Image: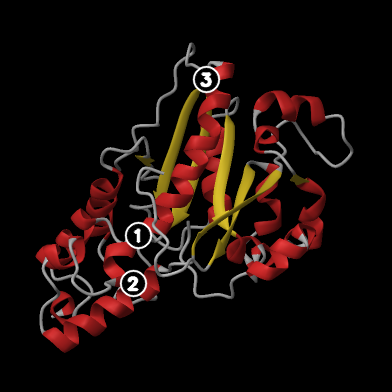
Amino acid sequence: MPYSKDYHLTKNAKPAIRAYLGGSFDPVHNGHLQMALYVYQSLLPIAEQQQHELQVSLLPNARSPFKADSTDPKHRLAMLKLAIKNTPLQINELELWQTPPVYTIDSVKTLRARYPHDDLIFIMGMDSAQSLDKWKDGLTLTDHVNLWVFNRLSIGENTPINNDTNADTDKKLVNTDLIASNPSALQSQLPVSLQHFITDSATDLVAPALKSLTASSNLKNAAQGRIYIDPRPVAAISSTQVRQQLRKQGSQNATLQPINAIINPTVPNSFAKWLNPAVYQYIIDHQLYSAAQFR
């Protein structure tokens, strides 16, 4: 089984801050990259100050046995490699090659056992966080890792997504007016049993803050996680939405538009906002998300 390049254990290993964004990445899109890079940029000065290594990794999940059109892991991995090129992001293949179903709680336990002394952060959208009570042992994730939660808001058609800057969603998104008028209302969307783990600062997700908080009756152990809700809006894009648009275009035009059509479009093109051009070219080259893929 292949392992990510963040898998290394030595007695003298440098302490690390490790953050993971999970998802199918089918395909990986700019919303995924935006969240991961926001986290990297926020944690970098903290890691440098503490002289800790920083790794922010995309964690693709196993192929679903319940989806006939689930894209082969080798294609999803190839697209991820293209998407993170020239970024500081990494890929962790922990789940990718396992036999489904693979549950997040099992993955975070594995990561905690692998890196018992490092700061571990699991990144997700609020749409996922508010449904943790429906996940397998979802309410116990913070027994092992910290959570960094993004409020995935709708961004206007002309709002750029910075490529130098988790899980797919078709669920409801948080109302932007609600956040502007009452930020605490966003916190209340988490399951009640998790709300007392919320912190106002991302710095509370790393070791010095955790050590000072272990005396709290709310924290079960030194690895007990905190939850940070990032107020920055990120693009409300879902991989399902991207796939639907790719199939729609393919059915209308027989073939997808060439790469130049999204890099320098003469008319607005959603793929220019959603996808890294190299990922889009890979989709064209391999006829992904079209009827031809499954012939």
Above or below, comparing residue 47 to residue 225 in the picture: above
**Residue nearest the viewer, comparing 240 with 165:** 165
Q: Position of residue 213 (x, y in %)?
A: 81, 31
For the C terminus, which image quadrant? bottom left
Q: Position of residue 184 (x, y in %)?
A: 79, 58
Is residue 68 visible in the rendered structure shown here? no
Q: Position of residue 234 (x, y in %)?
A: 51, 58
Q: Residue at x 25, y 54 (%)?
A: 79
Q: Is residue 107 left or right of residue 223?
A: left
**Marks 1 and 2: in contact by CB < 8 Å?**
yes
Disc number at residue 89?
none
Given the image, on which type of amino acid does mark 1 rest?
A: His
Disc number at residue 29?
1
Q: Residue at x 50, y 75 (%)?
A: 170
**Marks 1 and 3: in contact by CB < 8 Å?**
no
Q: Residue at x 58, y 41 (%)?
A: 121
User: What residue is shown with label 2?
Assistant: 242
Neighbor class of circle 1 (other Cα within 10 Å; few <14, some 14-19, many 20+) is many
